[in-house]
């Protein structure tokens, strides 16, 4: 049991060290986080005033994004802290927060567009009901 814990801890440290020296890029590292946690609101014509669908739209907000994710203002959680959010809450993992912060600290580099995940397509609706938050497909699913 002791060895299992030590090996697990060692692998975690090695993985963390491997990413410390690397450059975080929008297309490879940040865009997947935005697709999974932000774009359901941060897209044209939807409830958030800023779109995070493209690098060009997102880049000017890098420092602000760092501030709001590190301070845990985003993604919003309207329950009382320190209670655990609901199961469907799209809160960020610590590694996601660290990735966005590091990206901003490094000057928000774009990286290679070939590293981007397939885009997410959303239903075109003005209704802010639950169905408008769900992606309908990724480009590879079409």
Image (spheres, rainbow, N blue to C red):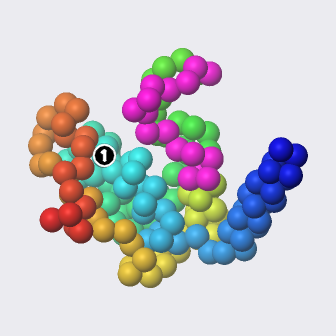
Query: Of 137 and 104, which appears nearest the observer?
Result: 137
Given the current orientation, which residue lies at the most extreme front position?
A: 1
Q: Residue at x 62, y 75 (%)?
A: 23
User: What residue is shown at x 62% (from left), y 21% (from top)?
Assistant: 82
Q: Is residue 28 above or below residue 7?
A: below
Corner quadrant of residue 107? bottom right
Indicate the secondary structure of the residue bearing disc 1.
Answer: loop
Q: Which is nearer the eye, 10 or 79?
A: 10
The answer to whether 79 appears left or right of 141 in the picture is right
When asked about the image quadrant of residue 128, the answer is top left
Q: Say which residue label 1 marks.
A: 40
Instruction: Give the residues in magenta.
Output: 82-97
Observer able to see residue 45: yes
Which residue sits at x=28%, y=65%? 119
Against 81, residue 140 (above or below) is: below
Identity of the residue furthest to the right in this view: 2
Name the spot of residue 79 as percent of width and height, x first: 48, 20
Quarter of the C terminus within the rendering:
bottom left
Residue 2 point in image, percent of width and height: 87, 46
Crowding near pointer 1: few (<14 within 10 Å), some, many (20+)? many
């Amino acid at each position: 049991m002791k060895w299992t814990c030590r090996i697990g801890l060692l692998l975690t440290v090695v993985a963390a060290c491997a990413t410390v020296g690397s450059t975080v890029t929008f297309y490879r590292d940040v865009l997947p986080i935005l697709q999974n946690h932000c774009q359901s609101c941060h897209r044209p014509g939807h409830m958030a005033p800023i779109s995070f669908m493209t690098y060009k739209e997102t880049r000017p907000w890098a420092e602000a994004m760092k501030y709001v994710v590190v301070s845990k203002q985003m993604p919003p959680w309207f329950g009382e802290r320190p209670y655990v959010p609901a199961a469907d809450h799209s809160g960020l993992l610590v590694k996601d927060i660290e990735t966005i912060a590091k990206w901003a600290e490094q000057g928000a580099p774009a990286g290679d567009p070939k590293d981007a995940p397939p885009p997410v397509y959303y239903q075109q609706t003005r209704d802010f009901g639950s169905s408008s938050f769900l992606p309908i497909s990724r480009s590879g699913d079409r």
